[in-house]
Amino acid sequence: MNILILGHAGSGKSTLVKNFGEYLEENYSVSRVNLDTATNPIYKAEVDSRNFVKTEEIMEKFGLGINGALLKSVELLKNHIPELVLKDDFALYDTPGQLELFLYTNFGEIFSEKLRGNDISLAIFLVDSYLCRTPENFLSAIFQSVVVSLRTGLQTLTVFNKTDLEKPLSFSKLRELIEKGEGVLSEMLETLLPFYDLTSLRYRTIEISAEKFTGFDELSGAINEIQCSCGDLS
């Protein structure tokens, strides 16, 4: 099972790779892969992209700023994709902090294609629950989760992280707030509601705290259902 972990900067991707990996290791063999060429991993990585490409060295070599160097880094990393895809009971792939570096580059497209052809694979779109306190932010996250599915071609689990600090809105509360709103913004939000049904949230809401090791049983259950082809995520 390949698990590609994506999310915005600060959503807790690396912490999830570290701690969920430890949780899985109680029963399975687990490999961790760091795909972020700009950051040393906080966990022991079986494969670290920085062994092939380091963003700070790219900045110096090509005279680039940080954004240009990040794009150049993933461009060069394409040459090492075969070495980055591992076989194990579970292989966890920690993507760059900047979501667009994976979703909107040729590297991400080719890497996702490689995963799709290599055993069972899925994506986790990790959402910081604190950012989902308003309908605008919540639906932005939902829409982005759908984009993850489209861009990677992988079945995607939408997972709310940091729920020990803040709970995400329920769908019923989300609809209630939108219906009470007025103006063009509320109309726009209402048109985005159907995207909710295109995510795994239509079956279950997975709430975790990667830092506190909570919610991992539920997350593991959802992953196993996909692995066993047991139908929907209910």
Image: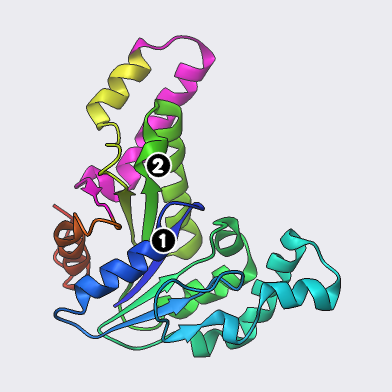
Q: Residue at x 37, y 63 (%)?
A: 15
The local secondary structure at tag 2 comes to helix
Mark 2 closeness class: few <14, some 14–19, many ≥20 residues within 10 Å:
many
Residue 123 in sight from this viewpoint: no
Q: Tally the numbered discs.
A: 2
Q: Is residue 37 above or below residue 129?
A: below
**What's the mark number on residue 142?**
2
Gap in Å between the C-alphas at discs 1 and 2?
A: 17 Å
> The disc labelled 1 sits on which kind of residue?
Lys
Q: Is residue 49 above or below residue 136?
A: below
Q: Is residue 21 magenta?
A: no
Q: Nearer the viewer, residue 113 or 180?
A: 180
Q: Which residue is mark 1?
A: 13
User: In this picture, which residue range is highlighted in magenta?
Assistant: 180-209
Q: Nearer the viewer, mark 1 or mark 2?
A: 1
| Vertical position of residue 162 compared to residue 73: above or below | above
| Residue shown at the point (47%, 64%) measured from the top left | 152
Query: Compared with residue 167, is residue 103 higher up or lower down, i.e. above or below?
Result: below
